[in-house]
Amino acid sequence: MIKDWKKFLWPYQQAVNELKVKFRGLRVSYLDQTNHSPIEFVTGRVKPVESIEEKLKRRYVAEELIEQDLQDIAGIRIMCPFVEDVYQVIDVIHSRTDMTVVEERDYIQNDKPSGYRSYHMVIEYPVYQYNEEKKVVLAEIQLRTLAMNFWATLEHSLNYKYPNDYAPEVKDRLKDVAQKAYELDVEMSEIRKEIEESHRRQQLTQNLKQ
Ligand code: 0O2
């Protein structure tokens, strides 16, 4: 087993720190330059050692394959106001030259059996160590709306406290809540479109009057 976890996890911690700064900076830049940021807030974490060990065991991952098989040791979460914003940020991530997308899972269009929705991207991200040696680590970026985050956060905390203790009816109710959260997202997007369209029409009328 890995003896020096601090040393092993350093590049992952560095990746999380740098990515948080970059995506939070992007939000500030959007707000400075436009009237809307597709990023509401950003969080990040390095997977705790106990969770890494549990996942290694559960998936029968050999220690020498840990870096390529465990894609979420470094995890970034980007919360977006609207569903369209999630896809906008995905495009931004694809266009970046400082990270490379190697895998994507769209759990927004294809929700999980639990009702969970988010967009997952695995990226390769280089960090530079004291001797200027470059180390490329994998990091998982989860993108979701505020409504998806509300559901996932509460469901995760319930599952963490009472693992696998749900009766089937409770699972169904949780799934139902996830669907309602998604309907809120869809409705908010429609309202936004209508407001933007009405604003556009007003501007057009004003321009014609001038
Ligand atoms: P944490 O604390 O958020 O990191 P696996 O990791 O083996 O379960 P896989 O295929 O590696 O599965 O990854 P997957 O399913 O694409 O994504 C796993 C992560 O997505 C989870 O990480 C959660 O963050 C989130 N997730 C997936 N399904 C659910 C769900 O039903 N409810 C909630 N709340 N989150 C979900 P971790 O490691 O479980 O937790």
Image (spheres, rainbow, N blue to C red):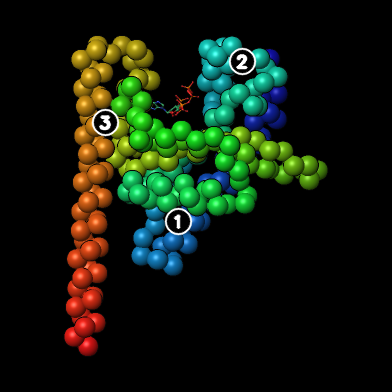
Q: Where is residue 140 in the image (x, y as percent from the top left)?
A: 53, 35
Q: Position of residue 195 (x, y in %)?
A: 21, 61
Quick check: 88 above or below 60? below
Q: Residues within 10 Å of mark 1 (few under 14, many from 20)?
A: some
- Judged from the image, the quadrant occupied by ligand 1 is top left
| Residue named by callout 1 | 27
Secondary structure beneath label 1:
helix
Q: Pick the residue in front: 55 or 95.
A: 95
- Choose top left, top right, bottom left or bottom right for residue 72: top right
Question: Taking 28 as reference, is 146 left or right?
Answer: left
**Amino acid type at mark 3:** Ala
**Amino acid type at mark 1:** Arg
Q: Are marks 1 and 2 in contact (CB under 8 Å)?
A: no
Residue 153 in view:
no
Q: How far apart are marks 1 and 3 (CA)?
A: 27 Å
Secondary structure beneath label 3:
helix
- Choose top left, top right, bottom left or bottom right for residue 4: top right
Q: Which residue is drawn at 22% across and 88% down?
A: 210
Image quarter in which the N terminus is found: top right
Question: Taking 122 as reference, is 2 left or right?
Answer: right
Residue lying farthest to the front in this orientation: 208
The disc, 1 or 3, on the residue closer to the chain's N-terminal end is 1
**Amino acid type at mark 2:** Val
Ligand 1 within 8 Å of disc 3? The answer is no
Q: Which mark is residue 178?
A: 3
Q: Where is residue 143 in the image (x, y as percent from the top left)?
A: 42, 41
Q: Residues within 10 Å of mark 2 (few under 14, many from 20)?
A: some
Quick check: 44 above or below 30? above
Q: Residue at x 24, y 44 (%)?
A: 186
| Residue named by callout 2 | 61
- Choose top left, top right, bottom left or bottom right for residue 69: top right
